[in-house]
Each structure stands twice: as structure tokens, then as C-alpha cells.
Amino acid sequence: MQLDQTIEKVDVYAVALPTIRSFGVSGGSIAVAGHPSIRVLVKVSGGGVHGWGEATPTPAWTYETAESIFTTISRYLAPAIIGQPVWQLDGVSRVFDRTINRGFSIGAPIAKSAVDVALHDLVGRALGVPLGALWGQRRCEEIQLAWIVSGQTPAEVASCVEEGFSEGYQAFKVKIGLHDERTDLDVVRAVRECAPEAPLWVDANQAYTVDQALRTARKLEEFDVFAFEQPLPANDVAGQRRLRAASPLPVALDESLRHPSDLATFVKLDAIDVAVAKVQRSGGLMLSRRLCQLAEDCGVRLLGSGLTDSDVGLAASLHLFAAHGISGPADLNGRQFISSPYAGGITVKNGMAQVPDGPGLGIEVDEKVVQELSIEL
């Protein structure tokens, strides 16, 4: 790759992907079977090479919608980076921050992530190496995935766990906060009864107050839960410090960690046990790598998660997690809920995902299929 190659073009597509199963969190519905799931795909081109990135609109989880992501990229981020060197990933990140300024910690991270990932893919393809070789950092070759449970009743939960086992999965993540505290505990109990030896953690997606979270954590301890993820609202820093001090379970932070500086704040306050690495939440691979390295340097354990990504986002997460040895179980649940007919190159078998070996992200995107799946927003 020549150092004088620049970003020449950014194409943005909103695509409608088939939904396999319904999925909900405490904030609302994520996917509905029978209704298409919308993703925004980005193609960045320069110097005769291109790369792909993905944004996952999840209004039930955060504020960015398909429409806002599409216009943020096409009207603001793309024009701002045309002419920038394709290899200057850190410089592009700084351009992003000048174009869409930071809010409490970071502005429009999901939109920024799609372009950041596409640029990483482009640079890896231009050099003919996978992202791990580009970074000089790849600690594992496969990552265990968790099967997601978000059932409404113990009977539904039992069926979901059985389905996960039938697909070869051996670890489970349970979404709670969808019900009252007692029903949440009944759901976790049902999972543990169906999977007595499986690694198990729970995610409340900001649904609880401190008192509710503390009561729940004390009762969850009997189910051998290895982490209690994001029980409190993302900006409740004082509450998180209080909860971490009293909780019998390790408390993992996800929505609270938009930017590496957020992690630094929680570390300084002694208010975190586990940091969740999530590419799109943190604005892409550049900032996610910084967050992961900071966690390692501070002795904070890392868990891996995603945003029900299709295969472009899945590939990006696999490379990030492999670089930092986050071998799982990881919540990369896209394959459970949606299909990616536009892409190939990722192998998932018996709940184990192989880290791609090809250049860049290591997957092939059929642009003709992308165009066929594209919709108007």
C-alpha cells in the first residue's frame, strides 16, 4: 500500500436482513421474527481497494436509529474524511470527533464505528494481512459464543436452552430486567436447572436501581452466575461504586463504557470488576483497542459482546477479541437472530467461532446482494 493513497469514496447502504428469531431486552424489542432487521453497511474505497463496515441500529438499547446513522455517515462523516490518508486510522478518529462532537463521552459511536471498521478492513486488504497481523496481536484462534436467553416464562426458557444445546452451544447469557425481580430470578433459575454446568451470566441492560440490583445480586449468587452485567443506568457512577462495593457477584459494565476515558473514571473510583468490549458501542476498533488495553493494564477483566451484528460486525468483534485473548464465552449473538446473505467467510460450529484468516476482516461481501437487499429510509 502506498502511503499517499487517500479515501476516495464512501458508499452507504441500509439493508433489510432476514430475522430468524425474536429478541428483546429491558428497553424493548431488538428483533421480531417475520420482520426484517435493518443494518447500515458502509463501503470505503481508496487506491483501488475497499473495505466494509457495519452499524446496527438498536433504539431499544441506545439513541442511534437507522435513519440517524445513515444520514450521520452520508452527510457528515463521509464528506469529512474524503482525501484523508487511508492508513491514518487515528487521524480519522480525530476528524470524527471534530465533525460530530462528543456528548457525555462520545458522539454517534455506532455510525462512527461502521466507517472505522471499513477503514481497518481496507488497510488490511491493501496490505494483504488480517487485522491481527496488522496490529501484531492475535492471542487465540477461536472464540466460544454464548446462546442468548430472553424468555418470558420458565417454560419458554427451558425451550430456548434446549435449542441452544441442540445447536452445540455450551454457555448461556440471560437477559433480565424484562419482568419484576421475582420473575427475573425464576428465569435465571430455570436456565440453571436446564444447564447445571454451563457458564452463565446475566445482563439487566440498565433496568435496576441500586437497591434492586443489590437484592438481585445476592439471590443470583446461588445460581453460580459469573458476572452481573450493567444492572444500573449507564451514567449512575455513584450507584455503580456503591453496588460494586457490596455485590457478591462481579459487576460488568457495558453501556457505561462508551469511551476509554469512561473506563478510566470507573477504575479511578474503584467501581468496576469487568469491562465489556463492544466494537460499535465504543466507536469502532481504534477506540475499542485502547479500551481493552487500558482494562488489561489496570487489571480489569474483559468480556466480549456485540449488538446482534450481521457478519461484518461479527468479523470485527472476532478480530478484536482474539487480539486481547477474550476467548469467551462472548455475546456475539447475530447468528442466533439474523442471517447475513450478503457475506461469507466466517465459520461457527458447535458454538465456536473461528477467527478469519483472510486480509482485513477476512470475509467476502457480495455487493450485488447488498444492493438487492438495500431499502430506502
Image (cartoon, rainbow, N blue to C red):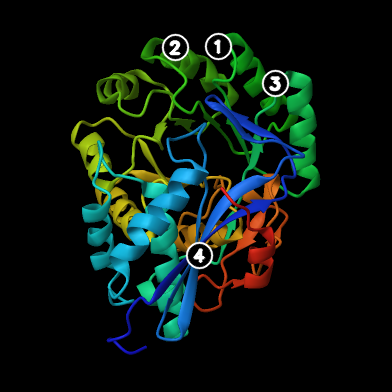
Residue beneath the point at 21% across and 37% down: 265
In this rendered view, identify the residue nearer to me: 109 or 83: 83
Residue neighbourhood size for the residue with mark 4, other residues' Cα within 10 Å, grouped as few (<14), some (14–19), many (≥20): some
| Mark 4 or mark 2, whichever is nearer to me | 2
CA–CA distance between discs 1 and 4? 38 Å
- Determine which residue is flagged by label 4: 140
Mark 3 vs 1, N-terminal side: 3
Q: Locate residue 336, reporting x and y percent.
A: 69, 46
- Asked whether the beta carbons under mark 3 and mark 2 sit within 8 Å of each other, the answer is no
Residue neighbourhood size for the residue with mark 3, other residues' Cα within 10 Å, grouped as few (<14), some (14–19), many (≥20): some
93 vs 19, left or right, is left
- Determine which residue is flagged by label 2: 212
Mark 4 vs 3, N-terminal side: 4
Residue beneath the point at 66% across and 15% down: 186
Q: Looking at the figure, which quarter contains the N terminus?
A: bottom left
In this rendered view, identify the residue nearer to me: 348 or 279: 279
Note whether residue 347 is visible: no
- Asked whether the beta carbons under mark 1 and mark 4 sit within 8 Å of each other, the answer is no
Check disc 4 and give the amino acid type. Cys
Numbered label attached to residue 152: 3
- Asked whether the beta carbons under mark 2 and mark 1 sit within 8 Å of each other, the answer is yes
- Per the image, label 1 sits on a secondary structure element best described as helix
Residue beneath the point at 79% across and 39% down: 163
CA–CA distance between discs 4 and 2? 38 Å
Check disc 2 and give the amino acid type. Gln
Check disc 3 and give the amino acid type. Gln
240 vs 193, left or right, is left
| Mark 4 or mark 3, whichever is nearer to me | 3
Check disc 1 and give the amino acid type. Glu
- Determine which residue is flagged by label 1: 181
- Per the image, label 3 sits on a secondary structure element best described as loop
